[in-house]
Image (spheres, grey):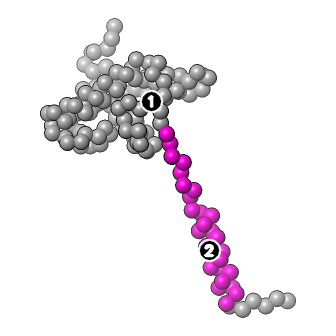
């Protein structure tokens, strides 16, 4: 029969705790590289991008992703990098417009889309509708 003394048990216990801590430490997330960003910062985080798309565009315009983003060629999901839909370039123009309005008229020094610092945002005009005040194309 093997007899372990307290010293060996303490060392084994610390070893087990360290092994569990190392195993539980999340791996470094892979850096996401977005393509075809023309207004948004190239280094935007997935959390910031998702928040902006949901809070600003979906809520402010009452639309879903496929309003601006084209279907993927394989028919599964959306092709977020594609410029096939004209609504995407319209959205870019609207983003540039709100940045310009906030800088010029409200003296927001470095307007950042998706922040509460903006006075003018999507909801200012759209109020949850894809086309503000009956401006829907015919």
Residue bearing the label numbered 1: 36
User: With 67 as the anchor, is 133 left or right in this view?
Assistant: left
Q: Position of residue 10 (x, y in %)?
A: 65, 85
Q: Residue at x 68, y 81 (%)?
A: 12
Q: Residue furthest right?
A: 1
Q: Residue at x 48, y 24 (%)?
A: 82
Residue shown at 31% from the left, 38% from the top: 113
| Magenta span contains residue 15 | yes
Q: Position of residue 2 (x, y in %)?
A: 82, 88
Q: Nearer the viewer, residue 79 or 58?
A: 79
Label placed on residue 17: 2
Residue 66 in magenta stretch: no
Q: Main secondary structure of the magenta part?
A: helix
Kindly state the secondary structure of the residue where label 1 is placed: loop
User: Tag count in the figure?
Assistant: 2
User: For the C terminus, which image quadrant?
Assistant: top left
Assign a secondary structure to mark 2: helix
Segment tinted magenta in the rendering: 7-33
- In the image, which disc is placed on residue 48? none
Residue 44: quarter of image: top left
Residue 26's spot in the image, x, y percent?
56, 58
Can residue 18 be seen here? The reply is: yes
Hey, which residue is sitting farthest top in the picture?
A: 138
Quarter that holds the N terminus? bottom right
């Amino acid at each position: 029969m093997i007899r372990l003394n307290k010293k060996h048990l303490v060392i084994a216990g610390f070893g087990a705790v360290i092994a569990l801590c190392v195993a539980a430490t999340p791996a470094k997330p892979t850096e996401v590289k977005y393509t075809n960003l023309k207004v948004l910062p190239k280094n935007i985080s997935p959390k910031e991008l998702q928040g902006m798309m949901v809070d600003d565009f979906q809520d402010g315009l009452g639309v879903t992703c496929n309003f601006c983003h084209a279907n993927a060629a394989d028919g599964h999901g959306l092709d977020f990098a594609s410029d096939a839909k004209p609504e995407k370039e319209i959205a870019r123009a609207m983003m540039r417009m709100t940045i310009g309005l906030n800088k010029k008229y409200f003296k927001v020094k470095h307007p950042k889309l998706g922040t509460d610092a903006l006075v003018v945002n999507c909801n200012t005009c759209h109020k949850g509708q894809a086309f503000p005040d009956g401006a829907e194309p015919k």
